[in-house]
């Protein structure tokens, strides 16, 4: 794993980064700055802030101290230059592309994604004139073939929905690099504790912080993190950053802010205009969640792998897709990209197809039937009837969300209790289906 | 200020930069622009707000003042003390500017983002000046004294005590 700080390691940074004691009160737990606006010292100070000449706060739609602390913590943990926190993971996806895209331009997108992202990019982006070109997530050559002069970004999920899929990041980063476009990676399912996409050549990372980062399913949020490495200056493909900005009196972001340009733009223009800012309360919950991320992820991963191994031997299970299993086609990629664990969200197929899938949800007693993942609670879902139900049959199979597929997000409860719950559900399912 | 030694210019310790920013008072900014939305003007205005005396040096401008400060045509013409020279000029001009900085008794020679000149740096260090290359004093000041994180930027600063706001 890349060195994130000259002195301190990941677990220390998860606790400390961005959240030094409050300068005014010395409060050790970072305060919730629950305010919409901030007083200016005088007219000149106000002008400096509005002109982006000095760092500071104007209005919480653009930035807020608690939200900024979360941005710095996440940027630090990913090894990035800066972060922009958003109201949800979906908002983060759009915010990530906003400085890059324009009407008529294309984003190449891996086909193994959260169903909501497939809808957002495949359908709603058409209203902006943005085209999503879907390609085979497992085939870097497919990405290469899809590159055109209109390509402005490549988008993939690192450890992909609905589970068990590992993307060959290094190979796809090479395609992006050769095409001269940034690689945007959704790292929600892996978290920076398991994988840091910048290490493999990604340029921008997005997360739904709602999942493992906040960790307890209690705060919606997203983040866009910039590596600071992509060369925007003088690059005519990205006029938002490389040409004078009429909104800021002809200031050129890439020239004035150097490697901070993308993050500055994301606050000063994207958040300002799209307004998908995160509430300070949610940022505070997420800040506290991240402090325990390493401990939680270790337990999530060890529980999940043990459950995958149990399910693989269960007579009522047809198959299990978990990259930590030797039977998985992603086993080798998992060892390369996620050596500390391949996450806790994975899929398996129950015997009996769609009907059995739905029944399974009714039989479990500990696993909760919800449309979320990355919670301390163990969660269970039938993607074909819920998160992925807007997709066509062909898309369902491409996305790994066929009729018999159950997705689970393994929590941090006692392993034996989770196994017992799945075992009784599968056994009763078998009886009921006979 | 302790005497300089040859240091690794690929990565500076925070203490090195913090010590420079804490100890200098007057900064001659070579290449300061009179145009308000140029990067050098942003930096000058910010450093003035933080209490530094900033002396603009620009032989090409018609303006007599930049940000309310008298403009000089070169370093040698400056009448008062100069602690630090901040260079907003192409790297091939660094050598000559270091010679001027030594003559006027500057203690620090600072080259802006994307500007490297190892020969000029060695000349300055041999004369006892501290040198910083490929950094911006505005960004470094904001990073080390608590404001850069407000923009969601990774400052690398980890602290168990109150942030020192200035």
Image: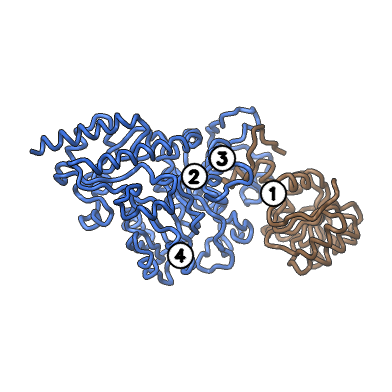
Chain colours: A blue, B brown
- Measured as percent of width and height from the top left, residue A401 is found at 25, 50
Secondary structure at badge 1 equals: helix
The quadrant of the image that shows the C terminus of chain B is top right
Residue at the outermost bottom position: A149
Residue positioned 36% across, 57% down in the render: A125
Quarter assignment of residue B131: bottom right
- Same chain for the residues at labels 1 and 2, yes or no? no
Residues at marks 3 and 1 touching, judged by CB atoms closer than 8 Å: no
Q: Find disc 2 in the rendering and name its residue.
A: A85
Q: How many marks?
A: 4
The chain to which mark 2 is attached is A
- Measured as percent of width and height from the top left, residue B83 is found at 85, 51
Secondary structure at badge 3 equals: helix
Quarter assignment of residue A330: bottom left
Left or right of A348, for residue B132: right
Going from N to C along the chain, the mark reached first, 2 or 4, is: 2
Would you place residue A331 above or below residue A284 in this image?
A: below
Q: Find disc 4 in the rendering and name its residue.
A: A176
The chain to which mark 3 is attached is A
Going from N to C along the chain, the mark reached first, 3 or 2, is: 3
In front of the other: label 3 or label 4?
3
Residue positioned 34% across, 49% down in the render: A323
Front position in the image: A419 or A65 = A419
Residue positioned 41% across, 71% down in the render: A148
Q: Find disc 1 in the rendering and name its residue.
A: B140
Q: Find disc 3 in the rendering and name its residue.
A: A13
Residues at marks 1 and 4 touching, judged by CB atoms closer than 8 Å: no
Q: Is residue A281 visible?
A: no
């Amino acid at each position: 794993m890349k060195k994130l700080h000259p002195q301190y390691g990941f677990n220390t940074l998860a606790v400390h980064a961005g959240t030094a004691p409050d300068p005014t009160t010395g409060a050790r737990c970072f305060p919730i700055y629950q305010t919409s606006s901030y007083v200016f010292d005088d007219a000149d100070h106000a002008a400096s802030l509005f002109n982006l000449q000095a760092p500071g706060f104007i209005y919480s739609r653009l930035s807020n101290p608690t939200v900024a602390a979360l941005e710095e913590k996440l940027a630090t943990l990913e090894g990035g230059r800066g972060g922009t926190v958003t109201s949800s993971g979906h908002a983060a996806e759009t915010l990530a592309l906003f400085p890059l895209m324009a009407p008529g331009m294309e984003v190449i997108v891996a086909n193994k994604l959260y169903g909501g992202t497939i809808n957002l990019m495949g359908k709603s982006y058409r209203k902006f004139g943005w085209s999503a070109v879907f390609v085979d997530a497992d085939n870097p050559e497919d990405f290469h073939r899809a590159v055109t002069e209109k390509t402005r970004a490549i988008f993939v999920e690192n450890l992909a929905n609905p589970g068990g899929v590992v993307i060959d990041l290094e190979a796809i980063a090479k395609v992006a690099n050769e095409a001269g476009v940034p690689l945007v990676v959704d790292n929600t399912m892996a978290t920076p504790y398991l994988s840091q996409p910048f290490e493999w050549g990604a340029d921008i990372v997005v997360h739904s912080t709602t999942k493992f980062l906040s960790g307890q399913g209690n705060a919606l949020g997203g983040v866009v993190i910039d590596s600071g490495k992509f060369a925007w200056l003088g690059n005519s493909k990205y006029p938002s950053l490389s040409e004078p900005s009429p909104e800021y009196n002809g200031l050129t972001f890439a020239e004035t802010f150097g490697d901070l340009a993308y993050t500055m733009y994301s606050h000063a223009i994207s958040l300002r205009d799209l307004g998908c800012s995160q509430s300070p309360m949610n940022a505070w919950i997420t800040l506290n969640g991240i402090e325990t991320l390493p401990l939680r992820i270790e337990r999530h991963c060890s529980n999940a792998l043990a459950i995958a191994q149990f399910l693989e031997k269960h007579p009522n299970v047809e198959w299990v897709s978990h990259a930590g299993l030797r039977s998985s086609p992603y086993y080798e990629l998992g060892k390369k990209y996620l050596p500390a664990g391949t996450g806790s969200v994975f899929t398996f197929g129950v015997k009996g197809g769609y009907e059995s899938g739905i029944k399974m949800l009714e039989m479990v007693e500990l696993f909760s039937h919800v449309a979320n993942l990355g919670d301390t609670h163990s969660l269970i879902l039938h993607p074909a009837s819920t998160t992925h139900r807007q997709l066509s049959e062909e898309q369902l199979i491409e996305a790994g969300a066929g009729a018999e597929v159950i997705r689970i997000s393994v929590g941090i409860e006692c392993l034996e209790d989770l196994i017992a719950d799945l075992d009784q559900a599968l056994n009763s399912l078998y009886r009921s289906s006979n | 200020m302790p005497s300089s030694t040859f240091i690794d210019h690929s990565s500076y310790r925070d203490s090195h930069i913090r010590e420079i920013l804490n100890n200098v008072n007057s900064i001659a900014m070579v290449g300061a622009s009179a145009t308000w939305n140029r990067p050098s003007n942003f930096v000058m205005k910010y450093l003035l707000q933080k209490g530094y005396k900033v002396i603009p040096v620009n032989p090409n401008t018609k303006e007599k003042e930049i940000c309310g400060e008298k403009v000089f045509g070169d370093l040698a013409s400056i009448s008062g003390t100069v602690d630090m020279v901040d260079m907003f000029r192409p790297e091939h001009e660094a050598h000559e500017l270091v010679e001027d900085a030594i003559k006027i008794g500057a203690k620090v020679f600072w080259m802006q983002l994307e500007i490297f000149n190892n020969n000029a740096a060695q000349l300055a260090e041999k004369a006892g000046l501290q040198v910083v290359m490929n950094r911006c004093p505005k960004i470094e000041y904001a990073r080390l004294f608590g404001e850069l994180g407000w923009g969601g930027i990774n400052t690398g600063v980890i602290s168990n005590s109150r942030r020192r706001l200035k």
